[in-house]
Amino acid sequence: MPFVTAGGHRLEYEWVGEGDAAAPVVVLLHEGLGSVALWRDFPASVHAATGLRVLVYSRWGYGKSDPIPRGPRPVEYMNWEGREVLPDLLRQLGIARPILLGHSDGGSIALIHAASGLAPAPVGVITMAAHLFVETVSTISIAKARVAYEESDLRAKLARFHDDVDGAFYSWNTTWLLPAFIEGFNIEADVARVRCPVTAIQGGEDEYGTAKQLDAIRERTQGRAEIVLLANCRHSPHRDQRDATLAAIARHVARALAAAAA
């Protein structure tokens, strides 16, 4: 597994598929407990659906990337990921035209970067279950996740995908349950500054967020975003409704390439 230093930390990454060197690259940004390995075969499916090269990487504290302290992170940690780490990583790996595809926290980070005006600017942004703000359903599910982590086999399952599973879990879980984070995290103003094409995908039964997130994306992009609300789908559209999710991704790529050409 290759590594790159970005944002001051050693991060694992992996390329999936071949493609035209001048074409955009789909960059996958994982969820709050994700990693390169936890994407499983989804990156290969994205490559097959789009014909583009795909990059996956594990953020600081996840997978085989550098470990992170186990306590809460700063309230602004996703801003740091989107405005400092991600652009640094893209430059280090020579990605000039990214299409950002983010799940949950990764979707929020993708939107933050797209709004920042920093190079390399994304050609498009696709989110799956992104958070623009914290909802009560989010904190309830995150509190339940801590109980499951400490009382069930969840820790053992996650330990297969993270070198420091406690760092990965508690740096995410304790941060999202901080009153300062619950009250202070809001990226609606960022989304209003995004100018590239956006597709927002969410499950109708998402246990970590409601359709209010999609409503906010629709409003803040002034109706420019494609909104995809999937039935019989929870927090992971790429697992619960893979075919519909891949179809939305393929539509987005075609739309983003057409917009870039124009």
Image (tube, rainbow, N blue to C red):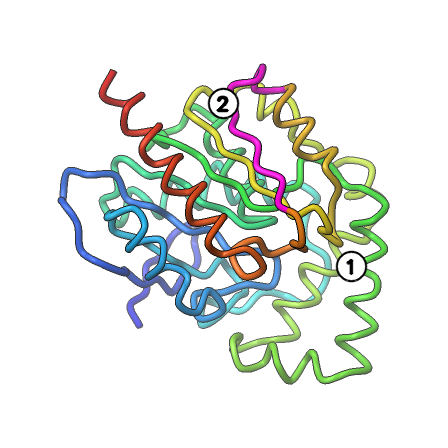
Q: Residue at x 36, y 41 (%)?
A: 250
What kind of residue is marked 2? Val
30 left or right, relative to 204:
left
The residues bearing labels 1 and 2 have C-alpha atoms spaced at a distance of 28 Å
Where is residue 72 drawn, in percent x and y?
Answer: 72, 57
With respect to residue 249, does 139 lie above or below?
A: below
Disc on the earlier residue, 1 or 2: 1
The mark found on residue 229 in the picture is: none
Residue lying at 71% horizontally and 51% vertically, measured from the top left: 206
Describe the element under mark 2 as helix, strand or loop: loop
Residue 213 located left or right of residue 137: left
Image quadrant in which the N terminus is located: bottom left
Residue located at (22% from left, 44% from top): 94
Residue 222 magenta-drawn? yes
In magenta stretch: residue 255: no
Q: Amino acid at mark 1?
A: Ile
Number of residue marks: 2
- Mark 1: which secondary structure? helix
Residue on which disc 2 sits: 194
Mark 1 lies on residue: 142
Residue range (magenta)? 220-230
Looking at the image, residue 141 lies above or below residue 110: below
User: Percent position (x, y) of residue 154?
Assistant: 69, 78
